[in-house]
Image (spheres, rainbow, N blue to C red):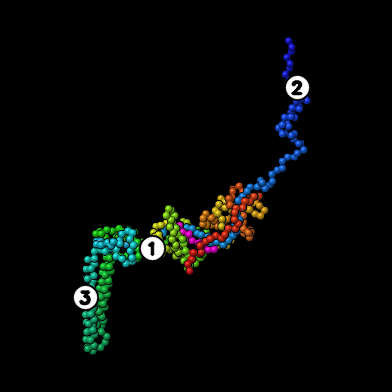
Amino acid sequence: MMPLKTLGKPTRRAATPGVLLTLLTLAACAGGSPPDPSAGAAPPPAADALSPAVTVQKVGPSAVRPEIWARGEVRPRYRTVLSAELSGALVSISEQAHSGRRVAAGAVLMTLDDSRYLEAVARAKADLQAAELAAREEALLAGQARADWERLEAGGTPSTFLLREPQVRSAQLRVEAARATLREAETNLSRTVIKAPFNAAVVRRMASLGSYVEPGSELIELDSSDRFELRLPLAPRDWSLLPPDSELVRRRWRVRLSTGGPDPASWTGVVDRVERHVEVSTRQRSLVVRVDDPLGQDPPLHAGTFVRAALSGRELDRVLDLPAHAISDRGELWAVGADDSLEKWPVETWPAADGRVLVEAPASTPPGGLDVVLHPMASYVAGQTVRRRVVAGELPPEVTREPPHGLD
């Protein structure tokens, strides 16, 4: 038998000329060419290609009037519950004394049974007449007593009692007391007629026809209708944007009121006064807005309506008007400088219309404005090089605002 060959490394054999020719032919068909060892590596990308791109808009400072927003509930100037001052049966109720009705000042709403009070007036008149008659009699007697003393020519000074002066004074006091009793009786008689103390809207009636009331019994609740008021609590920062208190009141600073929802409505009020104390719980101070003839407006403004109020502040210089998303979550304004590096400033914002905010322009703002980053990211670092992508439009037009909310 022939011996087995030992396993080992494969034996290298020299390539034959035919094999080499075949390999070269295949390489030529594939279009390949042997690599050039002298060729260098691919060039690295440009530095700008590695910088993040940011969207910026050119924004310049301008003079604007910030808007101050607040919310509050509309309330009548007076809300009164009329109560009975006398006792008696309720004998009549006006058709106007029902909820929702409007009544004029002095309108009769209800009447009480007045028979007892008519009797009291008649008795007081009789007592007054008797007292006046007694006073005249005492005056005649006093005159007669003085004449008798003078006729006697007794000399000296007669006593006041002899001249009946105390009796005359007592009779005069009884006349005054009788007159006061008559006035009280007449006043009680007038109180049997319940009248509206001012132009009002009836909120609710608590007494019914025929019911017997006592002094203090609640009869009807009224809201004054000539003027409504609205308290607007404002934070110290809001007050800093407004003109002085005296100017707000003197110029009757206008306030726009509105409601949202499916059926929005709006009204106009004016600043009536400012409060002089700070609420301890909120650290806010309020101004009071008045709305004249609220029920006569279109649409009517009803008491109890919760409204949003807006009033323009004083004019501010060097203010940037920006979309709210241009301010980072940390309250910072980012911009791209002349050297294409990021800059940032902590800013305080004031709300503006249409989802925009107002910020004070940084002191280093160039005359041409800032390239403000519209969508700052948390990963940005001050001094970082970026590529700016400017949105359409250069300096935006000045913010359109209503004229100062003051009436000459």
Q: Residue 263's x, y, as percent? A: 42, 55
Q: Amino acid at mark 3?
A: Ala
Q: Amino acid at mark 1?
A: Gly
Circle 3 sits in a helix, a strand or a loop, which is it?
helix
Circle 1 sits in a helix, a strand or a loop, which is it?
helix
Give the residues drawn in magenta, as a range.
308-315
**Mark 3 in CB contact with mark 1 (< 8 angstroms):** no
Q: Looking at the image, is mark 3 or mark 2 earlier in the sequence?
A: 2
Examine the rendering and report whether any part of residue 69 can be seen: yes
Image quadrant where one finds the N terminus: top right
Q: Which label is found at residue 130?
A: 3
- Image position of 384 with respect to 224: above or below: above
Left of 20 or right of it: where is 97?
A: left
Q: Which residue is mark 2?
A: 11
Q: Residue 189's x, y, as percent? A: 26, 67
Q: Which residue is mark 1?
A: 296
The structure residue drawn at horizontal position 72% and vertical position 41%, both measured from the top left corner, is 42
Q: Looking at the image, is mark 2 or mark 1 earlier in the sequence?
A: 2
The structure residue drawn at horizontal position 66% and vertical position 50%, both measured from the top left corner, is 385
Residue 26 vs residue 232, the one in the foreground = 26
Magenta part mainly helix, strand or loop?
strand
